[in-house]
Amino acid sequence: MKKNILITGGAGFIGSHLTRLFVNKYPDYQIINLDKLTYAGNLENLKDIEDKPNYTFVKGDIEDMDFVKKLFTKYNFDGVLHCAAESHVDRSINDPLAFVRTNVLGTVSLLQVAKDGWKDNYDDKLFYHISTDEVYGSLDEKGFFTEETAYDPRSPYSASKASSDHFVKAFYHTYRLPVIVSNCSNNYGPYHFPEKLIPLCINNIIHNKPLPIYGKGLNVRDWLFVEDHVRAIDAIFHKGKIGETYNIGGHNEWKNIDIIKELCRQMDEKLNREKGTSEKLITFVKDRLGHDLRYAIDATKLENELGWHPSLQFEEGLSKTIDWYLNNKEWLNDVTSGAYMKYYEQQYGK
Ligand code: NAD
Ligand code: DAU
């Protein structure tokens, strides 16, 4: 079936994998990627699909309502996959307002444009909002986030994402705008910007730089390979129920210190370094303010209702990820030059 689909933030980490999947898997869909190209957006992430006839890139800001309205009029979108966001917790601690602008105001603008553009005729339309497990807050050693867990965001990033989720649901309840929200755990994989734990440490191991571990490294995250996340989004977009929330997660909890030790072990092997070399780079640094202890997703609803399961064991996914970075040093060098160094020095010192 022919469809016009708007993907926002398609030049970012998850957005680029999602765009690639949709462009390749659905040749009858016209995919329009709207991205502001902030520091996190990179058209190099989409080099392999940029010439496909069913793909168009448009540079623009989701907050620019007039611009997005014109885009809606031009393409008469059947679906919106909303990925664009400010996504890094540490940056949200330094500059919360930037997160309110894009994540809250940008999302509400987009909802309003979709509502106006669809003129209350919602047949076969869908506004899909991509969100995070961080909206649920922080867990102790036990328990999992389900779709019923009460929201308890604790960082400026998660507060802005929680707010956007609430607006999406408010548009459903108030105007019957057809929406779906999914809340996913930590992703990892190729094209991950090296401000986040795993790619930052891969880059630092390559360059023999310290591996900064916040606090004692005992915080727990639930890691999912990014291609499994976008497969879940595909399933939910096509088979999910309007108005519902779906949790997405990998049943794959790791303490930060353990994940970095595993990373060091694999990288020593791949770089032919003596066993234990990279671990010596581990450096405990000042903890993140308000650092959430543990995230863990219960994805039973998605598994039972839509038959989705993660495809990769973590060690295998991590190995594929390291190989991608080692084979794409030019990409890594490009994104870590210029403004990245300024951010790095501000966050970690010289
Ligand atoms: P990212 O930071 O890698 O990419 C964000 C993209 O959005 C970039 O291409 C950027 O240029 C674009 N963008 C930012 N502000 C914009 C604006 N105002 N207008 C248009 N484009 C704009 O983020 P990501 O890690 O790929 O995350 C994508 C989405 O998935 C986010 O909504 C995030 O909250 C959510 N999420 C991320 C993870 C994760 O582990 N990375 C996990 C769960 C959910
Ligand atoms: O849970 C989903 C979320 O996962 C997404 O919504 C966010 O967009 C994404 O950035 C990610 O948030 P985290 O804060 O969990 O990811 P990050 O890679 O920044 O950190 C992972 C863990 O590692 C966290 O406990 C903080 C710690 N950490 C991070 C960095 C950057 C360190 O110990 N040292 C570091 O230098």
Image (tube, grey):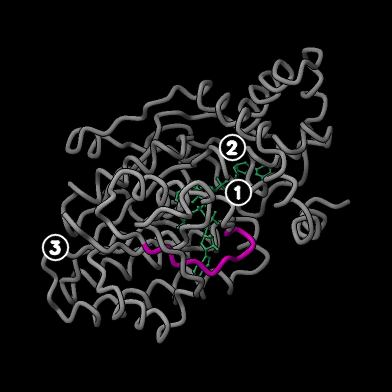
Q: Is mark 1 within 8 Å of ligand 2?
A: yes
Q: Would you name the residue on which mark 2 appears?
A: 219
- Give coordinates of residue 15: x percent, y percent: 45, 53
First reached walking from the N terminus: tag 2 or tag 1: 2
The CA distance from mark 1 to mark 3 is: 41 Å
Residue 69 figure quarter: bottom left
Residue at the spot 59% in from the left edge and 69% down from the top edge? 96
> Between tags 1 and 3, which lies in front?
3
In the depicted structure, whether residue 90 falls above or below residue 322: below
- Give coordinates of residue 65: x percent, y percent: 41, 83
Q: Which mark is residue 124?
A: 3
Callout 3 environment at 10 Å: few (<14), some (14 to 19), or many (20+)? few
- Residue kind at label 2, given as amino acid type: Asn
- Residue kind at label 1, given as amino acid type: His
Which segment is the magenta one?
A: 32-41
Question: Residue 231 lies in magenta, yes or no?
Answer: no
Q: Nearer the viewer, residue 318 or 146?
A: 318
Residue at the spot 51% in from the left edge and 75% down from the top edge? 101
Q: Nearer the viewer, residue 26 or 82?
A: 26
Residue at the spot 48% in from the left edge and 32% down from the top edge? 141
In the depicted structure, whether residue 119 falls above or below residue 344: below
Q: Are marks 2 and 1 in contact (CB under 8 Å)?
A: yes
